[in-house]
Amino acid sequence: MNLDGLYSELTLEMKAKLVLVVLDGLGDLATREQGYLTPLEAASTPNLDALAQDAAQGRMIPVAPGITPGSGPGHLGLFGYDPLEFQVGRGVIEALGLGLTLKAGDVAARANFCTLDAKGIVTDRRAGRIETSVCEELCALLSKKVKKVGDAEVIIKAGKGHRFVVIFRGKGLEGPLSDADPHRDGAPIPKVEAVDKKSAKANKAAKLVAEFYKAALPVLAKKRPANGFLMRGIAHQPAIPSFVERYRLRPACIAVYPMYKGLAQLVGMAKLEGPQTIAEQFERYLTEYDNYDYFFIHYKYTDMHGEDGNFEAKKRAIEEFDAALPILLQKRPDVLAITGDHSTPCALRGHSWHPQPVLLTSECSGSDKLERFTETGANLGSLGLFEAKYLVRQMQANAKMFDKFGA
């Protein structure tokens, strides 16, 4: 039996409010160097602690055991889309998040400025996290100098910080392509290749990327610290069923960074633009409360500090989130889930495969009698260890959206 089909058959029309709050990269590891504490355990979180008194907790596997997810698969899983079935290039997500419209045959890449040494070795993958204004200037320069490669138009748009998007618009193109990113410092930019070597369209797209590098790198050669760029998630937009179709909920996204807006748009969520801080995001939720059934609220900074290996900064980011939480609770939803899209341990300075903690509270959740929301506590929770793709189904069940199965 098709499980998604069964869920659809059992779904009832209910007037319920569901909220998913994602602290990006929330999960962490308790290491000796960190006093055997994670940032979540070390942080002062009185509001999360209060929620924990009336909540169920558990841990979620983002994709499959041992597989480290990117942000795209991590969030698609949280939205209930099996990330192994629905594979979406990061470039597509970022482009949509920046408000760009992708046409059939467009190939999009998520890019970021980096620092290269005289031999073309990457010495800083994020170019010191340059300011957005610098990124905008560099993107404007590239757009002026490189408008076309081969028979394809090149569209470049700046994102936040060191990030930007490149779209190749032409005939006979498709992805996915391998990354032009070594994913570590101390290595050269790798050559891009078609994932499917037999695809003429993908091979053509790979050649265009190579031509783009040949034309664009000289434009940046004298810039510091951003004298190069990396590209990843190079792909075309796939077909994907909408959130409304799958769950019969009117969804909205309140996020700051383009990538997460793009992920939400990909599945048909409304993008509620404007807020720049978590407090402002929660205020917007209060304003829009009556207009939607499901809210996805994204908080970036836990992941950012985890990637920097900055334990104290990640701890402070959690505390800042916790301080703003009472704003959201002014209109407490019927079901509230708080989790991460994956773990970003400070000790590893990057995403990891470790299950992320999840807290779920509703009138049906009961209490696991845990005093705090932490990785250690979540290990003991009644939700147990489950795949992230089932979280939205857990939320629907807690909203009493499913009829009984069988006689």
Image: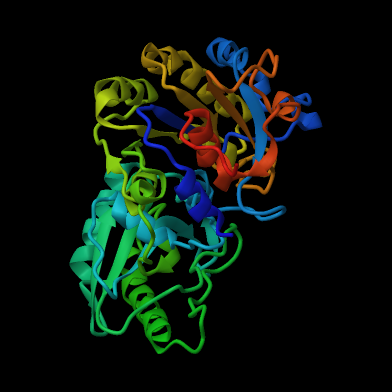
360 or 216, which lies in front?
Answer: 360
Residue 259 visible to the viewer? yes
Instruction: State the image coordinates of residue 264 (x, y, percent, origin top left).
Output: 36, 46
Q: Is residue 142 visible?
A: no
Identify the image's colour scheme: rainbow, by chain, secondary structure or one colour. Answer: rainbow
Q: Residue at x 29, y 67 (%)?
A: 167
Q: Is residue 57 left or right of residue 12?
A: right
**156 with respect to 120 (left or right):** left
Give the quadrant of the N terminus: bottom right
Q: Is residue 279 above or below residue 4?
A: above
| Count of labels in the image | 0
Task: Locate residue 397, reporting x and y percent.
Answer: 53, 34
On the image, the x and y values in percent for residue 385 come to: 71, 39
Query: Could you tell whether 384 is left or right of 305 in the image?
Result: right
Picture quadrant of residue 326 = top left
Q: Residue at x 48, y 44 (%)?
A: 10
Q: Nearer the viewer, residue 265 or 17?
A: 17
Q: Where residue 154 sits: x, y (%)?
A: 25, 71
Q: Up-down: is 280 above or below 165? A: above
Left or right of 7 in this view: 157: left
* Snapshot quadrant of residue 273: top left
> Which part of the image, by quadrant, shows the C terminus?
top right
Q: Which residue does the image show at 57% across and 28% down from the upper left? A: 314
